[in-house]
Amino acid sequence: MNIMSESIRLDLRKQTISIVRTPTNLAAYGIIEATGMDVGRRRLDPYFDFEFSARMPSDSGVVAGDMLIVGSDYYMVMGIEPKQIIAEIGYFKMSVFKCNTIVSIYTFTTGTNNYTTLAKSNVHCLITQVRANEWSEDKALLIPKYRGRQQPFQLYVQASSGIVSGYDCVLVDSAGRRFRISKNIDVFISDGISQTQLMWER
């Protein structure tokens, strides 16, 4: 173990982390926190309250797209940067999103003419409103149901969830809210992560 990984192990803020894997989760540890500018920014803008920074030892086995469990909270590794010490990786610095929303994914059923076929349940993800400065009229034109009544939501989920490019499905969260993925917005997948836009079916 190198000196940086050892410093994480000895840090009083260290947390026990489970890296979600099949068939068995990996036991690990690290530090997940809001630091510096992020803390003040979050107080002013709730749109940022799902973003955290993290550090984990270089031998933890973590990769981008992993889901981490810390206590009762789930975090998805959005970006990972190896920090070098001389000729070896000292530790991993990461950006993680809190993913405590749990959804079931339903696909279209011809017999009922509705989205009633359960494709997958108990999927942890992040559903957040699109920030105003990221939303444009050009994007609105891509979603036929959008008529200025509401902005869309952004979905971040593991690629293994089964949501793929051009796949028409509905997500239902634990409160019974239904979110529709439009066929006109492609899901793009990078490092095991899917991102797309949703419309809330009121």
Image (cartoon, rainbow, N blue to C red):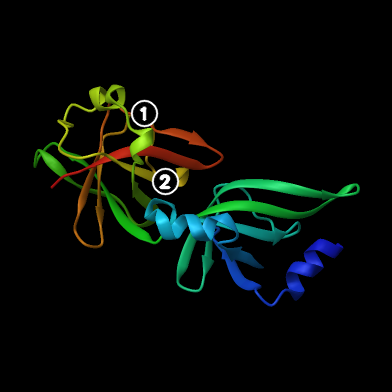
Say which residue appears at 45% left-offset and 57% top-offset.
42
Give the side of residue 138 with respect to residue 112, left or right: right
Say which residue appears at 39% left-offset and 61% top-offset.
100
- The image shows residue 152, relative to residue 90, as above or below, that is above
Amino acid type, mark 2: Tyr
Quarter of the figure with the N terminus: bottom right
- The image shows residue 92, relative to residue 109, as above or below, that is below
Q: Is residue 25 visible?
A: no
Give the residue at mark 1.
186
Image coords of residue 166 (percent x, y): 33, 29
Q: Is residue 172 visible?
A: yes
Amino acid type, mark 1: Asp
Q: Residue furthest right?
A: 86
- State yes or no: discs 1 and 2 in contact (Cβ < 8 Å): no
Foreground pick, 20 / 49: 49
Q: CA distance from mark 1 to mark 2?
A: 13 Å
Foreground pick, 165 / 80: 80
Foreground pick, 14 / 122: 14
Residue 156: which numbered mark, if any?
A: 2
Helix, strand or loop status at disc 1: loop
Say which residue appears at 46% left-offset and 46% top-offset.
160
- The image shows residue 36, relative to residue 166, as above or below, that is below
Q: Residues within 10 Å of mark 1 (few under 14, many from 20)?
A: some
- The image shows residue 36, relative to residue 108, as above or below, that is below
Give the side of residue 164 with respect to residue 192, left or right: left
Foreground pick, 108 / 183: 183
Instruction: State which quadrant residue 49 falls in.
Output: bottom left
Helix, strand or loop status at disc 2: strand
Image coords of residue 110 (percent x, y): 13, 36
